[in-house]
Image (tube, rainbow, N blue to C red):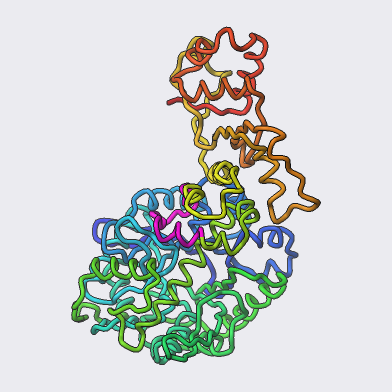
Amino acid sequence: MANNIQLGDAVLNSENNLSSTASGLGIRSELFDSVASINRSAEQKIGFFEAHSENYFGESIARAKLLKLRQDHPISLHGVGLSLGRADELDQSHLAELKRLVEQVEPVLISEHLAWSAYSHRHLPDLLPLSLTSQALDIICQHIDQMQTALGRQILIENPSNYLLFDQLQIPEPEFLNALAKRTGCGLLMDINNIHVSASNIGRDGSDYIDAVSSDVIEQYHLAGYTEVERDCQGISESILIDTHNHTVYDPVWDLFDHALSVHGARPTLFEWDSDFPEFEVLVGECQKAKVLLQKYPARSTESTNADKLRSIDTVNLAQSQDDFLDRVLSLSKTLETASPEHQHRIWIYQNNVFGAVQDYLEEVYPATRGVVGADFFKQMAQIFIQNSPPSTGNIHFYGEGMSTLCGSFDGLEGLPYLFDLMHYEWALHKSYFSVVSNSLDPNGVQQEELLTSSVIYNDSVSLIFSAYPIYEIQRQSLPTFQGSVSIDLNQSRDNLLVYKLGHEVQCLALDDQQAEFLSALEQNQNLLQAIEGLQGSIAEDTLSQILSLVFETRLLKRN
């Protein structure tokens, strides 16, 4: 049942109607086909699915699949990019896109993290550590209030995986979370794997952490696997647990989960697996293990601690420390001076996470480019691009457009004169996939005179690619999925390509010279009549009619 939570003048709606013994699975694009074919037995073991919100921003096939899944299964949304702990203002466009997704999916739960990822104009795709000071508490409470007010819903805050401590007196994390819940009305998402990872990395007791959190604000549990890394760094040899979500749940985490259930009782529980996917039955098995444990314990509640007495020593301004942290990640600095002396070298963990995640993303945007220049060279290009032009928003789908400018910056690329055009084409395909196509001009509902004279522009999915090289074949034959012998003659043709989206499918159409001329003219004019008049005499009337039919049938235009 939905609950209303009174908080000041706002009334927040909590849509959680999951059973306390519901066991769920994180849904990823690689799993949709498996989920669609699960049998009744498996379906009974998976009570709900949880999606990373930012993966479904924009209008894409993935979003359509999520909405279809929502017809038969409860969905929770788990955000990773709003950066609630940032020292400046929230990204309002990101929040608006999240609200749009929430309104469509109608999730049973919405969650975010006790972390930050952005400050000023730089946004890194990682959950960066937050100094748990009174200043940080005030800021993140303000941001939670803004998020809950915008969504009209209660949100849950997840405890992070910690790899270092800051060199100042901080509020203990369980007390900080209790205070957040008391001051904002948010709930808590207790990630058991993160508690174990953090306890191992910074020398704490996971059971004590669990005992210190107030039961009455816990709304969900998370379980996952981690990776143990042995590393020598600056003469320091240590074992670090990394929260990778690519393994079954380890025994110490199961033990902590059992302890949490004995203290706080059952709550809906989510098992996460994000990469290197095993057989689907393995994931179902982990959900079933969690469900068996959940059914052993009733839900129970303990009162919150008094959050009003929390104190910390704010020796570092939060904005300055976040700016410095970003500098040190992007510059691949060896140390982080604001961390405790024994943890200063662990900045490498965040550097690996950030550069690894963005490089993997750029490889997905430019798969043929990577195939042409090679994996190692592409990695160098990506690193330089990230350092000089880091992401600026939490919606990484639209990051990477300017990477083609690096083509003239490297020695050894002189023999690839088509590379810039190839990257331009690959970016057009990527941008089109995530674009939102709205307000398309329907010629059937408009008088001819109005149709010709209305101010129009191409919709956001459209790109025109004009190249002196056979870019279409270069891209197709350079993909990792291409099978057969590569056969490309750089002198055999030039390509005029139209990229657009029809429904959820990205289309690429080869244009003849007259089609290309007209579509280029239309791009530079305000309406169809101006484009037609500008080309009178150079295009035959029947050819022009065919081109106009193409424009209308593919719904390329929208009102300006």
Q: Residue at x 41, y 56 (%)?
A: 391
- Queried whether the magenta region covers residue 397, the answer comes back as yes
The answer to whether residue 391 is above or below residue 489 is below
Q: Nearer the viewer, residue 427 or 441?
A: 427
Q: Nearer the viewer, residue 364 or 394?
A: 364
Q: Nearer the viewer, residue 530 or 455?
A: 530
Query: As drawn, is 259 to the left or to the right of 119?
Result: right
Query: As drawn, is 259 to the left or to the right of 489?
Result: left
Image coordinates for residue 115, horizontal then vertical, percent: 37, 70
The quadrant in which the C terminus is found is top left
The answer to whether residue 143 is above or below residue 420 is below
Q: Residue at x 56, y 86 (%)?
A: 254
Residue 130 visible within the image: yes
Q: Hey, which quadrant is residue 201 in on the image?
A: bottom left
The answer to whether residue 281 is above or below residue 98 is below
Q: Hey, which quadrant is residue 161 in on the image?
A: bottom left
Residue 108 visible within the image: no
Q: Identify the magenta region.
A: 381-402
